[in-house]
Image (cartoon, helix red, strand yellow):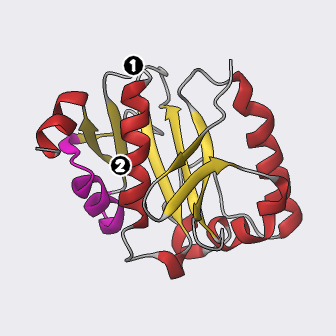
Amino acid sequence: MTSSLELHTERLTIRDWTLGDAEAALQIYGAEEVARWLTPEMRAVHDVEAMRSVLHAWMEAQPNLVPPAGRWAIAHKRGGDLLGGLSLRLLPPFEEDFELNWQLRPDAWGNGYATEAGSAAIGWAFEQGIEELFAVARPKNTRAIATARRLGMEWVGETEKYYSTRLQVFRIRPSDTAVRTR
């Protein structure tokens, strides 16, 4: 069982994390503008060694995740600059619903990278047999909410079911992507 992945879009490569990504990943997961929106179990990372430890833990866990779950790096095709991270994971507490989430370094915001990477991940997840994907966002996280909508995700309500935090919930199913591509 493995969740190794490499996807290519027009501008991006979605690939496995490496320990060599630690310094660049710190620009994402150490940025307060990003960390404030992370799930309660993921806090801001404060130094390269801590980031390397986080990446190591993600890399060690990857082969044991229920496919198509995983955590991947988003890199620019040209030059390979690390722009962000993307994951597909089972949402707590019941681990029934698959969540798509993304994080970009702040200087990469506003270029459509999250939508481009998210769209590729959605297509890939549906090819793996996933019947629906969810995205959750805190109500004031307007960037994440806008990205979920650009991905064609439908708002399905608000809940405290996941992470015991009030969240906006968005969903997409394979039939939604068929309508979107027409």
Mark 1 or mark 2: whose residue is earlier in sequence: 2
Residue 102 in magenta?
no
Q: Measuring 17% from the left and 45% from the top, which residue is drawn there?
A: 181
Q: CA distance from mark 1 to mark 2?
A: 16 Å
Give how far across and how far down residue 109 sits, in percent: 44, 76
Query: Which residue in the protein does label 1 denote?
Result: 129
Give how far across and how far down residue 22 sits, in percent: 79, 63
- On the rendered structure, is 44 left or right of 110? right
In front of the other: 87 or 169: 87
Query: How many C-alpha atoms fall within 10 Å of the one at disc 2: few (<14), some, or many (≥20)?
Result: some
| Helix, strand or loop at mark 1 | loop
Query: Which residue in the protein does label 2 denote?
Result: 119
Q: Amino acid at mark 2?
A: Ser
Image: magenta residue range: 139-157
Q: Is residue 147 visible?
A: yes
Q: Measuring 50% from the left and 37% from the top, which residue is drawn there?
A: 88
Q: Amino acid at mark 1?
A: Gly
Q: Measuring 34% from the left and 67% from the top, which residue is drawn there?
A: 143
| Helix, strand or loop at mark 2 | helix
In front of the other: 117 or 157: 117
Give how far across and how far down residue 64 sits, in percent: 71, 22
In front of the other: 174 or 109: 174
Locate the C terminus and report the quarter of the image it occupies.
top left
Q: Quadrant of residue 35?
A: bottom right
Residue 42 image label: none
